């Protein structure tokens, strides 16, 4: 049995980058929702902008996960 180390490294690298990107995107969504509370408490600014950004981050996470499941199933 021969192991293709280049392919294994490629899969590892793509998995690492995708994991870091998804965790970062989800973290940005959480931060956006926490900023919504700070804007509401201070009474200045619009609450809609952090909420829209957070929901966009969550939607992108959902899309990336759905695409990954699609790739696995097909």
Image: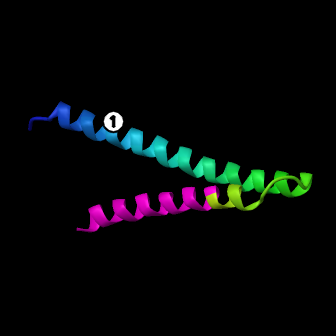
The residue carrying mark 1 is: 13
What secondary structure is the magenta-colored segment mainly? helix
Q: Is residue 42 left or right of residue 12?
A: right
Name which quarter of the figure residue 2 lies in.
top left
Give the number of callouts. 1
Q: Identify the image quadrant of the N terminus.
A: top left
Q: Identify the image quadrant of the C terminus.
A: bottom left
Residue 64 highlighted magenta (yes or no):
yes
Furthest residue in direction front, as rendered: 45
Residue 62 highlighted magenta (yes or no):
yes
Residue 10 spot, x, y in % from top left: 25, 36
Q: Is residue 32 left or right of residue 70?
A: right
Q: Nearer the viewer, residue 57 or 73?
A: 57
Q: Is residue 25 above or below residue 59?
A: above
Furthest residue in direction right, as rendered: 42
Residue at x 33% of width, y 36% of height: 13
Q: Nearer the viewer, residue 15 or 36?
A: 36
Name which quarter of the figure residue 52 lies in.
bottom right
Residue 3 spot, x, y in % from top left: 14, 35
Q: Which residues are magenta?
A: 53-74
Residue at x 69% of width, y 48% of height: 31
Residue at x 27% of width, y 41% of height: 11
Name which quarter of the figure residue 51 lies in.
bottom right
Residue at x 77% of width, y 60% of height: 47
Q: Nearer the viewer, residue 63 or 9?
A: 63
Secondary structure state at the residue bearing disc 1: helix
């Amino acid at each position: 049995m021969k192991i293709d180390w280049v392919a294994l490294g490629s899969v590892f690298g793509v998995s690492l980058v995708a994991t870091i990107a998804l965790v970062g995107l989800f973290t940005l969504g959480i931060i956006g929702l926490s900023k919504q509370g700070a804007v509401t408490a201070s009474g200045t600014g619009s609450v809609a902008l952090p909420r829209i950004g957070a929901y966009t981050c969550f939607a992108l996470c959902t899309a990336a996960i759905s695409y990954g499941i699609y790739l696995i199933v097909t």
